Structures are given as C-alpha cells and as structure tokens.
C-alpha cells in the first residue's frame, strides 16, 4: 500500500528552512554592511594611510657632507660619488658564504673586502644593506647588472665617499669619518638629532671632522617613492631635498703645514704655530702621520695592526695629546715669575761654577766650569741651568705652580677639537692627590730643584707651550687658540667667523715682560739659536731647549752616541716673530733628536721665512734640515709661489685635480636607501658616456649643472709679505673661477676620483717618553743632568 506524502507538512518545513536561511543571509548581509561601514567610515582615515604606506615608501635623503678648506681656499676634505656592490643578508636565498663566492666569479672580491664585510656584519643588523665592494669600475657595474637576476638581496647602489686629497698631510687635525658604531648610534638616538641622522652611516671620528660634525653633516631630506609589490622603487611622488653640510674654513695654511712636515722628514715630534694676537692656529703638526682615507670605508686588519701596533704611534696626536718636559724653554717663564714675585731683579748676579749643590747632591750645569757671573739676560741667552736651580729652590714648588698657571700650563687651552691632554704642573697638593702611600705623598725639597729647568714632574703639551709663548709675544694677553676661522652657510653663503676670544691677561708689569722679551731676542741674535737665525731679514725672539728622557746616574755623563735612540734627549724650541709686532709664535719638539738649537730651531727659521717673507727653502737646505745638519738656510731660497704645488708626484697632482673638481662641481647622487630605478638605469649608468667619468654614475655627471652650489669663503687676510694664494684657491666664491673650471673640464674624461697616495709603512712611533724625575724621598742626581740647548 503506497504511503501518501503530506504536502502541506513538506511545504511548511521548506518554508521554515527558507526563512532560517533568509534570516541567516540577512544577518550576514547586515554584518557585511556594518563591517563595510566600519571600514569605509569609521576607519577610513587610518586604512587610507596604511594603504598609502603600502604603496609608497618614505626614503631619507642623506645630505652631502660639507667641504673642509684651508685659510686660502685649498680643499682639504671633499666628496665624490661612486657605485658600490651591497648585500642585504636577510634577503639572500643562499648562504652568505655561497653568495659571496658566486659574486666573486662576476666581480673581483679580495680577501680584505671579505674581512671588512664580516666586520661590518658583526656590527650591523641583518636587514641593513652592507657594502662588499666599493668604487666599482664601469665594466664591473655592467657585468653585474647583466647577471643581477641571479643574486636576490644584492644590489648596486650609488654612494658618496669622503676624500682627503692630500693623504697624510695634516691628518691629525683634519681627522676622518667612519661608520657609526653602536655607542654613537645610541648617543644619536638619545639626542635631538635622531631624525637628522636617518639613513646616515658615517660620522666624524677625529679632528675637525669630529668637532664640527654638526656643521659638516647637513640636514637630511626625504623622498616619497611609489613602490612595487616587491618593494622596489617605481617613481618619485614627492621630495624634500637634503641640505648639504656647511663649508668649514680652517685657519691653518696647508702649504706652511706641508713645509714643516717635510722638514721633519721621518723624525717624530710636534709643532704648533699660531697668531698670538688672534689665537688662530697656522700649523698643527704631529709626526708621524697616517692616511685618513684608510678609515673612510672601514680600515682593514692589516693596516689597522700596522698603525695601532707601531712603536712610532702614528695615530697619536702629539701636538694635542703628547706631553713632554719643556726643558730650557721653561726658563723665560721662570724668569718672569721671579721678577713678579721679587725673587730676582734683572741685574742680580748668580755665580755659576758649573753645578748647584743641594742636600748632598750635585745638580750639574750644561757647561763644564760654569758660566761665571750670570744675570737674568745672560741666564736666558746662554741657558744657564745653575741660575734656575737656585731660583727654583728660592721659589718653592707651590709658588712656581701659582705663577706658571697664569701661562696655561697644566690646564686645557679650550682649542676647538676634542681629545686635548691637560698635562701636569706639579704642586704639593697634586702629589698628595696623585699618590696613595704617605711616603709618596710628601713633597721633598730636592724634587723642586729640577723643576726650574723644565724637568722633574713638569709635563706639558706642545699646544700649551705654544700658547704660553704667544702670551709673552702678545705682551701678556692670552688668546683662546682655535683651528677653524669660519663656517660658511651653504644656503645663504653667509660666513660665521670664529670670534677672537681673550681668556685672560697677565698681571705682570709691562717692564718685566719687556725684560724677558729682550732676552728672548738676544737668544736668536747672540745666544744658543743665533746660528739658525743668522742673516734673517727680521728680528725674532726664541728659546732653545733640550729635555732629558731617562735618568742618568750621579757621576755618569750623557753620551748620545752610546744611548738608545729612543732614550736620547728631546730637542725643543719656542719662538715668535717679528719681535716688535709678532705675527706668528711657534712651539715645537723633535723627539730624541738632541740639541734644540741644532735640530728644532732650523725648522722654525724656515717656517718664519715662509710666513713673513714668502721664501721657501731650497731642496738642498730641506735635506740638510731633515738630517739635523743645517743652521741658517743654505742654497738659493725660492719664492713660495714658485714652490711646487700641488706637491710633486702623480698621486698628489691627480688628487689636486679631484679636489678642484669637487669644489667646483659637487654632485647629487641617489641616496643609499634608494636603489637604481631599473636594470636599464644601472647598465646605462655604468657605460662610459660623453662627459661622464668612468667609475662615476653618469646620472651624477649629468646633474652637475643642477647640483647644489658650494660657496667657497673669501680668502683670509694674510701679512702683506706672505705668499699669495695658489691657483687652487678660487677667488670667485659662488661660481668656480675660470682656472678651476678649466681644471674641471680637463679632469672629466679621467678615471673616477683617485685614492690618495698611501706611503709605504714606516717604523711606528712610540708615545712620548715620561720625563726623568727625582726618586721619591731624595734629591737625586738623575734630575741634575744638565741639558745643553
């Protein structure tokens, strides 16, 4: 029997199902509408911003670093652009080693490149782009571009490189830049400049590059780029260009600096020359030097080891951080202190039998048999030790400390670069603080005697000695030393000149200063340095000095030929000229060279001749000075304008050309964070083109006309007799001079900006030896060894 279906029941069930489904669809539709309203209305602004961020990227534009010039407009630090091969470790598909190995089959990668990359990798994060090769040639760029598809996470990028065209010349004072380390990054993040350093990878590490980092860095710009799904830049939507760093004009004369460094030769030492009326530093020499270009891309381990472990310590800025006993150059300051305190009168006689006895010990004079009857003038001119042994005993250590502080000894000068050493001006309070054991804290009377001739605990920097000399030359007025003459604003072209700051004035009577100055003139006319200044067309004042390095036992005689070279006496000299109205004051040391009159004074004489008369020594004379075999100039002196500049040698000459080009036509390059727009752009940029230098992005060369102009400041006023600025110092400031334009045009077809010449490694320089000082608890004969100036 067939069962009949209940149609009404089925229909009812069907309708119920339809209703449930309809309600479900309606609810879902309402939820969808609600969500749509939420997304389109409530979160419209937020999601719109996120969508725009996914479509675009904000890329920092690193500014071109400012130029550093000498007082005559010669470029000391510039920039050039070049392509680099970079790896982003987080984006590579193979292991890092395999990627580098494969890259090495396309582009030459040397072991030192791998070591530098590994060092950068240890200091960086995996998503940062790190250079494995820098300064690629055109052929290398084209070769990689053709095989780029094989290397995800590897790109060619255009970067700006710092260039020091004169290599080792003035490297300690110019300084260098290097990659920002973790400590520097944390300091930047905690400061107010965090936003301005986005994208920046390099920072000043030493010298003016470090101290004037804020002025040289510039202002970071931004670009809004449209990006593809893969994150590659497609086109630029908007931009706020970076503002290049300002131009820093130093007060040093680089030709004077080079002359002095050449006269030192391979010898170690330091020299500071300054204008006593303004405090401007004219030369700041520390020998040996180093090539700052080695540090720009990260120094390799071999060069770092050679520099860091050298016994000559070329990385030590001896003028700023080296401390030395001043030797007999201390005597004029002692004489002025004696006049001011009433311990001596100008004509008061001290008899010198050739020694000074104290506490059963004999402090010997440099002249056997002594100088006889000695007044103040003779004590300085003939550099009589016995006179100052007796004077030190009469004054005592604390009175000497009080008087010598006025000259800046044992105090920071406040010069405008970092790292200055304070030196040591001893006192009883200092000794109580410096030592822990009670017997060491006590000051013994015998320790005072050798202080009078600039030995014992006395330890000062050459910068302090130069400042003290300039105070005497400037009739007691103390000027703050500075290395930067002005900073030129890159936008307004307005120079901000460093103010000449007076930091104090001696309370000494003018007649007492005149007595000491008269004796200093006598030193160069008839005294210990008369031979070096024979025939000079100007009158100068000076003081020779010889500083003991190691103790000599009582009864022994010092014999340089039988003493280890690094234990021989230091040669010192201080001077100023012209005597009546000084334009330049000098303090210097030649380490372990012996007599100051023979090895230091001749260098100062040539520096004075250059600065005051525009005369440059002959090659024969320079060779003799380097050997310590010259006094007055020999051979025919040349006009400074005739002296070879740029310095002879192909590397230096090419460097001068590169510097002129950098000053005349600075270029803008794509920021490090923005890769080339396309493979075709990379290939075309890497191919030689008319007007584009090989190894330099063609786009950068093409943009020279629209590059941000670099305004060179006006040449600083020089003495009328000083040599005229060289051709490499353009007078027309916003626009390059015709001479520079001619050099630039001739240079464009040449290879990319050259590496500065790296001289062969020389034996390394030891830190300045500690001064000989009396043994604790007694007046020892070790401090009584005479110093012949």
Image (tube, rainbow, N blue to C red):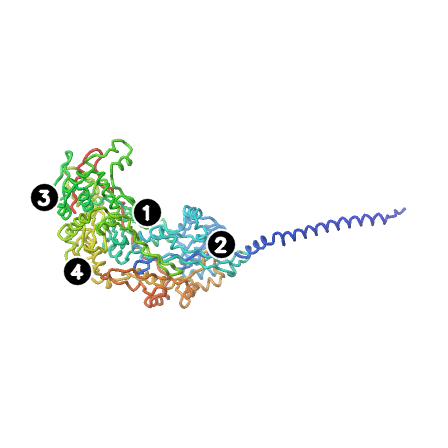
Q: Is residue 250 left or right of residue 672?
A: left
Q: Depth-wise, is mark 3 or mark 4 nearer the camera?
A: 3
Residue 530 versus residue 650 in the image, above or below: above
Please provide percent x and percent y for residue 349: 11, 43
Q: Earlier in the sequence, mark 3 or mark 4?
A: 3
**Along the viewing direction, whichever of 126 and 550 lies nearer the viewer:** 550
At x 32% / y 64%, what residue is drawn?
Answer: 730
Kindly identify which numbered label has been placed on residue 373: 3
Q: Depth-wise, is mark 3 or mark 2 nearer the camera?
A: 3
Kindly identify which numbered label has been placed on residue 419: 1
Give residue 639's quadrant in the image.
Answer: bottom left
Q: Callout 3: helix, strand or loop?
A: strand
Please provide percent x and percent y for residue 350: 12, 42
What residue is pinned by disc 2?
153
Query: Label 1, label 3: how many angstroms apart (C-alpha)?
Result: 45 Å
Please provide percent x and percent y for residue 495: 35, 59
Residue 203 versus residue 692 in the image, above or below: above
At x 58% / y 52%, what residue is drawn?
Answer: 46
Q: Earlier in the sequence, mark 1 or mark 4?
A: 1
Query: Label 1, label 2: how many angstroms apart (C-alpha)?
Result: 41 Å
Query: Label 1, label 4: how many angstroms apart (C-alpha)?
Result: 41 Å
Query: Label 4, label 2: how many angstroms apart (C-alpha)?
Result: 64 Å
Whether residue 149 appears in this view of the structure is: yes
Q: Callout 2: helix, strand or loop?
A: loop
Categorize mark 2 by other alpha carbons within 10 Å: few (<14), some (14-19), many (20+): some
Q: Earlier in the sequence, mark 3 or mark 2?
A: 2
Q: Depth-wise, is mark 1 or mark 2 nearer the camera?
A: 1
Q: Is residue 446 left or right of residue 86?
A: left
């Amino acid at each position: 029997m067939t069962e009949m279906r209940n149609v009404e029941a089925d229909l009812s069930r069907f309708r119920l199902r339809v209703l449930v489904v309809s309600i479900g669809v309606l609810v879902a539709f309402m939820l969808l509408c609600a969500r749509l309203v939420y997304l389109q209305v409530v979160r419209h602004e937020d999601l719109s911003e996120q969508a725009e961020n996914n479509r675009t990227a904000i890329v920092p534009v690193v500014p071109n670093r400012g130029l550093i010039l000498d007082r005559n407009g010669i470029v000391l630090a510039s920039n050039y652009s070049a392509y680099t091969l970079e790896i982003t470790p987080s984006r590579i598909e193979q292991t890092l080693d395999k990627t580098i190995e494969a890259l090495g089959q396309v582009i030459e990668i040397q072991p030192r490149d791998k070591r530098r990359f590994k060092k950068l990798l240890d200091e960086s994060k995996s998503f940062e782009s790190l250079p494995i090769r820098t300064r690629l040639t055109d052929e290398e760029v084209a070769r990689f571009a053709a095989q780029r598809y094989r290397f995800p996470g590897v790109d060619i990028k255009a970067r700006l490189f710092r260039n020091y065209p004169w290599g080792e010349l003035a490297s300690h004072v110019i300084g260098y830049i290097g990659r920002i380390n973790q400590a520097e990054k944390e300091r930047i993040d905690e400061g107010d400049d965090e936003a301005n350093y986005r994208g920046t990878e390099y920072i000043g590490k030493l010298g003016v590059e470090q101290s004037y980092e804020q002025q040289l860095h510039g202002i970071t710009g931004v670009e809004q780029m449209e990006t593809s799904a893969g994150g590659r830049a497609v086109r630029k939507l908007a931009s706020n260009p970076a503002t290049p760093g300002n131009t820093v004009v130093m007060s040093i004369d680089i030709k004077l600096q080079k002359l002095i460094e050449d006269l030192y030769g391979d010898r170690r030492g330091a020299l500071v020359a300054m204008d006593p009326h303004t405090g401007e530093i004219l030369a700041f020499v520390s020998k040996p030097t180093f090539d700052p270009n080695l540090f720009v891309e990260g120094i390799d381990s071999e060069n770092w080891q050679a520099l860091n472990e050298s016994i000559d310590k070329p990385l030590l800025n001896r003028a700023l951080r080296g401390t030395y006993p001043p030797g007999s150059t201390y005597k004029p300051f002692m004489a002025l202190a004696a006049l001011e305190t009433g311990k001596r009168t100008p004509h008061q006689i001290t008899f010198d039998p050739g020694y000074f006895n104290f506490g059963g010990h004999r402090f010997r004079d440099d002249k056997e048999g002594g100088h006889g009857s000695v007044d103040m003038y003779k004590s300085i001119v003939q550099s009589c030790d016995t006179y100052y042994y007796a004077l030190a005993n009469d004054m005592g250590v604390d009175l000497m400390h009080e008087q010598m502080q006025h000259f800046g000894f044992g105090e920071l000068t406040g010069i405008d670069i970092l790292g200055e050493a304070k030196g040591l001006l001893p006192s009883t309070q200092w000794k109580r603080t410096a030592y822990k054991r009670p017997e060491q804290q006590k000051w013994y009377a015998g320790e005072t005697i050798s202080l009078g001739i600039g030995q014992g605990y006395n330890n000062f920097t050459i910068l302090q000695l130069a400042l003290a000399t300039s105070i005497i030359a400037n009739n007691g007025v103390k000027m703050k030393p500075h290395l930067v003459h002005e900073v030129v604003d890159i936008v307004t072209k307005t120079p901000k000149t460093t103010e000449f700051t007076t930091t104090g004035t001696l309370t000494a009577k003018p007649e007492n200063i005149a007595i000491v100055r008269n004796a200093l003139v006598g030193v160069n006319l008839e005294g210990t340095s008369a031979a070096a200044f024979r025939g000079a067309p100007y009158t100068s004042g000076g003081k020779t000095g010889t500083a003991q390095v190691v103790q000599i036992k009582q009864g022994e005689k010092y014999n340089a030929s039988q003493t280890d070279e690094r234990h021989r006496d230091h040669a010192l000299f201080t001077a100023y000229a012209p005597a009546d109205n000084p334009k330049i004051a000098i303090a210097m040391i030649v380490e372990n060279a012996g007599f100051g009159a023979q090895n230091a004074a001749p260098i100062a004489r040539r520096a004075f001749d250059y600065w005051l008369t525009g005369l440059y020594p002959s090659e024969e004379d320079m060779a003799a000075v380097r050997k310590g075999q010259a006094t007055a100039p020999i051979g025919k002196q040349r006009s400074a304008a005739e002296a070879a500049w740029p310095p002879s040698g192909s590397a230096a000459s090419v460097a001068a050309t590169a510097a002129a080009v950098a000053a005349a036509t600075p270029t803008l390059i794509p920021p490090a964070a923005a890769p080339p727009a396309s493979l075709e752009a990379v290939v075309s940029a890497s191919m030689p083109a008319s007007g584009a230098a090989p190894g330099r992005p063609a786009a950068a060369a093409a943009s020279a006309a629209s590059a941000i102009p670099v305004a060179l400041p006006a040449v600083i006023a020089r003495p009328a007799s000083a040599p005229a600025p060289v051709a490499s110092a353009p007078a027309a400031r916003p626009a390059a001079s015709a001479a520079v334009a001619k050099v630039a045009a001739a240079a464009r077809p040449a290879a990319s900006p050259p590496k500065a010449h790296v001289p062969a490694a020389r034996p390394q320089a030891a830190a300045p030896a500690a001064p000989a000082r009396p043994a604790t608890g007694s007046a020892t004969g070790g401090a009584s060894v005479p110093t012949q100036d």
